[in-house]
Image: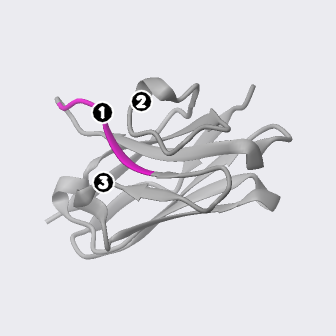
């Protein structure tokens, strides 16, 4: 079992940056592939990025390549999402998700654990 708690969301202007954090409970955080998804109002949840448990493999959705960066600090049981050059269309609730020893899946159904989400709002 792992519990995930996101933080770092907020209201920013277009072009600004934010860093989201996802703190995980449990002793085996380093064994989990971590990912970020987002869901905008009246839209389906969409994959943003995933980072393998080894830390060697990442996979980004095309719409965030070059702007967002995922990283993890296993000593702090935390995964981060650095978001730069934010756009109004990035407005959404951002969720982190975890899968034990998994690959960098892009489908939400492949992840076993989810956080409660953090709101990111980007004004134009």
Of labels 2 and 1, the one closer to you: 2
- Cα–Cα gap, marks 3 and 1: 13 Å
Q: Residues within 10 Å of mark 2 (few under 14, many from 20)?
A: some
- Cα–Cα gap, marks 2 and 1: 8 Å
Against 31, residue 58 (above or below) is below
Residue furthest left in the image: 124
Q: Is residue 117 left or right of residue 29?
A: left
Image x and y of residue 51, in percent: 54, 54
Query: Quadrant where the C terminus lies?
Result: bottom left
Q: Which residue is mark 2?
A: 108
Name the one closer to the observer, 71 or 119: 71
Q: Is residue 60 left or right of residue 33?
A: left
Which residue is found at the position 54% from the left and 59% from the top?
A: 57
Image x and y of residue 65, in percent: 30, 66
Q: Secondary structure at mark 1?
A: loop
Q: Which residue is mark 1?
A: 45
Q: How is the image coloured?
A: one colour
Q: The magenta stretch spans which residues?
A: 43-49
- Cα–Cα gap, marks 3 and 2: 14 Å
Image x and y of residue 18, in percent: 42, 67
Against 29, residue 61 (above or below) is below
Which residue is found at the position 81% from the left and 41% from the top?
A: 28
Which sits earlier in the primary sequence, circle 3 or circle 2? Answer: 3
Which residue is found at the position 67% from the left and 48% from the top?
A: 23
Residue 61 is tagged as 3
């Amino acid at each position: 079992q792992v519990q995930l708690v996101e933080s770092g969301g907020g209201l920013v202007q277009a072009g600004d940056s934010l860093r989201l954090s996802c703190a995980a409970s449990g002793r085996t955080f380093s064994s989990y592939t971590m990912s970020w998804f987002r869901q905008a109002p009246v839209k389906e949840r969409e994959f943003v990025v995933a980072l393998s448990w080894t830390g060697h493999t990442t996979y980004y959705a095309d719409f965030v390549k070059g702007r967002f960066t995922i990283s993890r600090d296993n000593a702090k049981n935390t995964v981060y999402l650095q978001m730069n050059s934010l756009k109004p269309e990035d407005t959404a609730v951002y969720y982190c998700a975890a899968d034990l020893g998994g690959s960098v899946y892009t489908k939400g159904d492949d992840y076993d654990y989810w956080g409660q989400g953090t709101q990111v709002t980007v004004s134009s």
